[in-house]
Image (cartoon, rainbow, N blue to C red):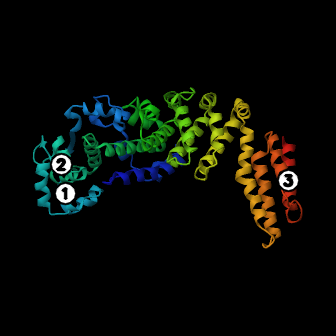
Amino acid sequence: MSTSDLDILILALNLLLRPAQQYSAQPAVSRALSISTYRLQSLGKRWSNLREYDVSLVDLVTDQGRPVLEALPIEAREVQFKFYNTGKAQRFKDRTNEMDVDLPENLQASQAASQAASQHTVASVSTAPSQAAGAVTLYFDTQTLSAKGAMDVLADCIDTYNVPEDERFELMCRIRAAQALLPGREEEREKLIIARLLATAIFVHTHPEAQTASSLFLYEPDLIPHVAELLVLDKNVPVAVQTAAVATLDAMARYRTKVQDVLAAVNAGVNHGTLMALLRKTVAEVATPESTLPHSFVEALLSFIIFLASHAAGGNMIVGAGLIPLLIQIIENQLPQRLAVVSKTMQLVDNVLYSFGNAFQLFCNNRGVEVIVDRIEVSCVLPLWHLYLLAGPSMKWTRTSERWVSKNIQMTFQDHMVGTPFASVRHIVTSCRSTPCRTGRGSQAYSALYASYDAVLWNC
């Protein structure tokens, strides 16, 4: 997490997010994943220089918030950091190991050169000489922060003022936040917001609710509405930021006392609310072959909805808001690059239909049965029969291959159709019956097909 490259930081946080989601709310998960609570707090908390100016997350990542940032006073782009100097000297040759950060090559020069450069880096220090024990206050103005990178300023400050190791990461985060508010730093600011959201999601997944309440929500009680605001369509928030925001809301909804706040923040029970509007836009976009919407965003959104559907109140709200017709539209999507989206949607359909009584009636009223049957025919049955028909007389059709076709067709029907009144499945049988080769080497496969159909009717 101490890397100087923000892209590497985001990739590392995404890597940690997966196991954090998998083992969410389990004790000792943070120790098992070797996650630093202190560093997650430093990355996830609100920027200290913006607490007094009511700047939201949307203002930091959208063009609409640019006038708000330009109107900030000069103090918001400066850094004032306090720590206690123990007075113990540190040797320069051990500096790299103690910092645990990536240093630029130009900082590998001699100690004298680094100390000379630090005199121009730090604007003022309200303390005695660096080796004297006591409270130290560091101040960095905008001229200093714009002249050098965050890691350069941090390294020079460590050399000159003996910053304790447990204070360095916090100082680095504050320097980065102040530099991101400078003009022309939109890309860096966006990456820092993504890192903050991911760090918050990991922290919530890996720490108990009481600790999160005292560490994050105590200082930012309106965090959930601010994160949910990133999902509003007319804000034009970048997709990468929205992906991290969805992951954060998904993590916060795991807390019993916060799930209602999350549902209210995304207007889960309203058809034109934030969540349903975002899902409708996503469904329409993934149906376009030219769409560049990343799969990570769609997966995060569907995972979030799956969790809300597992909650009694949340499931009733999203089903009543119009979830079923949107899921049917996703199932109708036959684009090969969106096959993973359809697979994820089928899991959600299965959960919703078995959990809520009105969901199945809505599913049938919106042609859900026909869509499922057509999807099975296109994705499973027809490819198997095409393979069978393409194996002409010149190819040897063994009992093993014939048994393979029979087994797959039978498994397809039994896995997807048993237990529901799929009356429209008859048209698949009719179409197969009209296939030219119904006898000989295909007789076993057709027998399996009819046997599966009989099993469907029996279970209905």
**Callout 3: few (<14), some (14-19), or many (20+) C-alpha neighbours within 10 Å?**
few
Residue 372 found in image quarter: top right
Q: Is residue 140 visible?
A: no
- Badge count: 3
Q: Classify residue 37 as left or right of residue 286.
A: left
Q: Of label 1 and label 3, which has the lower sequence position?
A: 1
Residue 247: x and y in percent read 48, 42
Q: Look at discs 2 and 1 and give the one toward the viewer.
A: 2
Q: CA distance from mark 3 to mark 2?
A: 77 Å
Secondary structure, mark 2, is: helix
The residue type indicated by label 2 comes to Ala
Which label is found at residue 90? Answer: 1
Look at 76% across and 65% down and name the residue there: 390
Q: Is residue 411 above or below residue 231?
A: below
Secondary structure, mark 1, is: loop
Secondary structure, mark 3, is: loop
Near-viewer residue (111 or 345) = 345
Residue 191: x and y in percent read 36, 46
Look at 43% across and 44% down and name the residue there: 240
Residue picked out by circle 3: 434
Which label is found at residue 10? Answer: none
Q: Of label 3 and label 2, which has the lower sequence position?
A: 2
Residue 233: x and y in percent read 47, 33
Q: CA distance from mark 1 to mark 3?
A: 85 Å
